[in-house]
Amino acid sequence: MGRWLSPLLPNPQHWIMQDREPDLLGHVYMGVTSTAPVTVETRLGDLGGVTAADLAGTSLVTASALLDILTAGEVDRLAAACVEARVPALFTLSVLGEVELSPAESFDAEITAAFNEHQRRVQDGRRLLGPDAPTAIVESFEMHGANVQVAPSPWQLGRDHGELTAEWLRGWVGAAVEQRPELAATAASYLRQRLDAIEAGRLTGSVGHVDVLAVPA
């Protein structure tokens, strides 16, 4: 987000990079230019528990590929905090649970369903939103009085990015099997065939995501 947004925003800028994983915070300076007039600091914390007071002096809240690992309550608290603090929010690459591969195979739907179940799993007593997150965040922001815009931002799986597509495919199938172990044998054969298709340049596809912009009224 820093690499993309920083050149589009006025200077000077001060970025506060927040995450609940200390190891990830250690990589922040690799991703954002920290030379003047842009400065960066890191903060250990969970955006799902942010309050309006935490956002004092903030001009924008932004995150990427985050909402699916939050709960409905956390999403609502986040929206309420942004609106109360009168801070616009931009959340990008929120997964929709929609995958289209070409050429299509009958087992695609089985893997998609199992992956979506995995996204909605209960983790440490928390029911994750998974692909329900975009709808939940839009409803919460609108309920709290914000103006909301939603735009599609699908991942395009093309022949020019075979290694990336293969890495995504392994993770997608792996999560599905973790959720439904009974799929393991069929999924292993499916994965081999799909990886062969990627190597041969025959597989393309699209993974549905959306971007959400909310601006307090």
Image: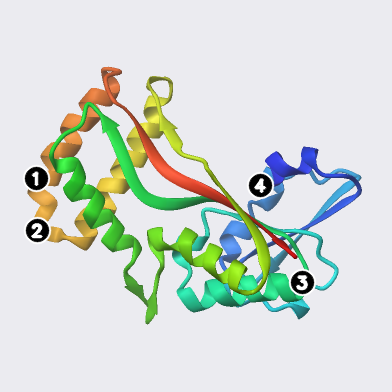
Upstream in the sequence, badge 3 or badge 4? 4
Horizontal and vertical percent position of residue 214: 66, 59
Q: Is residue 61 left or right of residue 102?
A: right
User: From mark 2 to mark 4, how far is it between C-alphas?
Assistant: 38 Å
* x 77%, y 43%: residue: 6
Q: Is residue 156 above or below residue 58?
A: above
Residue wearing tag 3: 55
Q: Residues within 10 Å of mark 3 (few under 14, many from 20)?
A: some
Q: Secondary structure at mark 2?
A: helix
C-alpha gap between disc 1 and disc 4: 38 Å
Label 4 belongs to which residue? 1
Q: Residue at x 71, y 71 (%)?
A: 83
To which quarter of the image does residue 40 belong?
A: bottom right
Pick whichever of labels 3 and 1 is earlier in the sequence: 3
Location of mark 1 (residue): 186
Nearer the N terminus, badge 1 or badge 4? 4
Percent x, y of residue 194: 21, 31
Q: Give the mark nearest the N terminus, 2 or 3.
A: 3
Locate the C terminus and report the quarter of the image it occupies: bottom right
Task: Find the distance from the CA under tag 2 to the CA under tag 1.
Answer: 9 Å
Which residue is nearer to you in this view: 60 or 194? 60
* Type of amino acid under label 2: Glu
Q: Is residue 214 left or right of residue 124?
A: right
Question: Could you say which disc has been placed on residue 182 in the image?
Answer: 2
